[in-house]
Image (tube, rainbow, N blue to C red):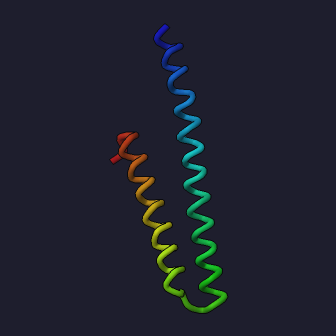
Amino acid sequence: MIKIHLILVASPLLVLIGASLAFADASYDVGYNAAKFDFLHHKSYNDSCHTDCTQYKLGYSEAWNTLNGWLGNH
C-alpha cells in the first residue's frame, strides 16, 4: 500500500520537474541566442538588450539554485 502511494505522489512530481527543467532550459537558450544575434548583428549591446540578457542569466541561475535546494543538492 505504501508503494502505491509513493508512486502516485512521485510520478506527477517527476513529470512536473521534467517539464520545468525543459522550460527553464529553453527560455535561457532563447534569451541567450537572441542576445548573441543582437551582438553580432549590431556589433554592440544596447542597454535594453544588456538588461534583458542579465535578467535571463539571473533567472536561470536562481531557478537551478531553488531546484537544487528542494532536491537537497548543495
Would you place residue 15 above or below residue 19 in this image? above
Q: Residue at x 45, y 61 (%)?
A: 59
Residue 71 image point, x, y percent? 40, 40
Residue 27 image point, x, y percent? 59, 60
Q: Residue at x 43, y 65 (%)?
A: 58
Residue 67 image point, x, y percent? 43, 46
- Does residue 19 appear to the left or right of 1 in the view shown? right
Q: List the single residue furthest toward the bottom.
A: 43
Q: List the single residue furthest toward the front.
A: 48
- Does residue 20 appear to the left or right of 40 in the view shown? left
Q: List the single residue furthest toward the left.
A: 74
Would you place residue 6 above or below residue 32 in this image? above
Residue 50 image point, x, y percent? 49, 80
On the image, which quarter does residue 44 sit in?
Answer: bottom right
How many numbered marks appear? 0
Would you place residue 40 above or below residue 20 in this image? below
Would you place residue 35 above or below residue 41 in this image? above
Q: Residue at x 54, y 20 (%)?
A: 8
